Every structure is written in C-alpha cells, then in structure tokens.
Amino acid sequence: MKIWVDADACPVVIKEILFKAAERTQTRTTLVANHFMRTPPSRVISFKRVASGFDVADDEIVKNVCPQDLVVTADIPLAAEVIEKQAYALSPRGELFTQANIRQKLNMRDFMDTMRASGEQTQGPPPLSQSDRQAFANHLDTLLRRHAGQ
C-alpha cells in the first residue's frame, strides 16, 4: 500500500497525522500539489509538484495509483476514479468512500453545483472537528493495519 495525498486542500492537522502514521508504519506517502509544500525529512514521505491547472494534481494521482493504495482527498470525482482503480479513498473528515456510497456522493455534489450555479447561496463545510480528526485517524489506522507488510 502507498498513500497519495491530494495535498492542495488537505488540512495541516491531517497531514501531520499522515506524517506520523507513515513514519510509524514505514508506508510510502506522496503529497501531490500545484504549489510547494514542506514535508518532514523522511525516506518514506515525498512531495510531487505538478503544474497549475484544473485537475492536474488529480490526474497525476489517478495516473499513479495502484489497487489497494490509499488516496486522501475531499474531491468526490477523484475519489470515484480512485475507487474504479480498486484503491481506497478517504476524506480528511474521516469518511471512507466506497463502491456503495460514491454514486450518492457524486449525485449530491452535482445537485449542490447546480444550486450554486442557479444563484442559490450554500454554506461551505463546517470547520474540521475533533471527531472528524479522530474518524480520519481511525480509518487510516484500520487500513494501514489491514495492509501491513504488503
């Protein structure tokens, strides 16, 4: 298992959880973003900078992800592509995207996009809570234990 992080919008606290887990389990972890991002000195943590542009980081992740890898992203279309490649997709809020729930998530995302395009004022997501962080850490730990030694 390798971890890929859609890092442009990933909260700092989630990156810190990922860095600790990657070191503890010696799991290769790559942050992908279109602007420079500092990572701790590590032989398992790396950063890949991509060109600016719509979905460039997403495309890089999809190109490189393998079955059973983990992608950390809040981007639902990216999560859907990752699941199609038989990899895992986990949101920074700790929600594991699966074959069973991704279609509903895509439909809701499209509905909200339509609402915003029609001029409807919608609220953004609430701030990341302690329970979100805990849910993320728990799912991450479960996936890492499941794939230990692979």
Image (cartoon, rainbow, N blue to C red):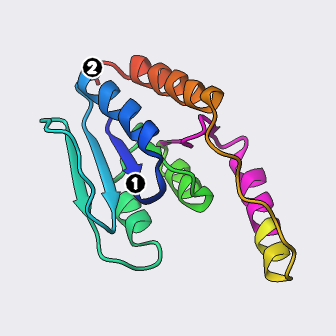
Count residues near mark 2 (Cα–Cα under 10 Å), then give few for <14, some for 14-19, many for 20+. Answer: few
Q: Position of residue 38 (x, y in %)?
A: 23, 51
- Name the image quarter holding the N terminus: top left
Vertical relation: 62 (above or below) 97: below
Q: Position of residue 86 (x, y in %)?
A: 49, 44
Q: Position of residue 62 (x, y in %)?
A: 41, 59
In reply to whether residue 87 is colored magenta, the answer given is no
Q: Which residues are magenta?
A: 88-111
Distance between mark 1 and mark 2 Cα atoms: 20 Å
- Badge 1 amino acid: Ala
Q: Quadrant of residue 150?
A: top left
Count residues near mark 1 (Cα–Cα under 10 Å), then give few for <14, some for 14-19, many for 20+. Answer: many
Mark 2 = which residue?
A: 24
Q: Position of residue 92 (x, y in %)?
A: 54, 42
Q: Identify the residue at image location x=80%, y=75%.
A: 116
Vertical relation: 67 (above or below) 1: below
Q: Report whether 1 appears left or right of 45.
A: right
Please say if the residues under marks 1 and 2 sit with CB atoms less than 8 Å apart.
no
Q: Quadrant of residue 124?
A: bottom right
Between 131 and 70, the one nearer to me in the picture? 131
Mark 1 = which residue?
A: 7
As helix, strand or loop, the secondary structure at mark 2 comes to helix
Between 14 and 105, the one nearer to me in the picture? 14
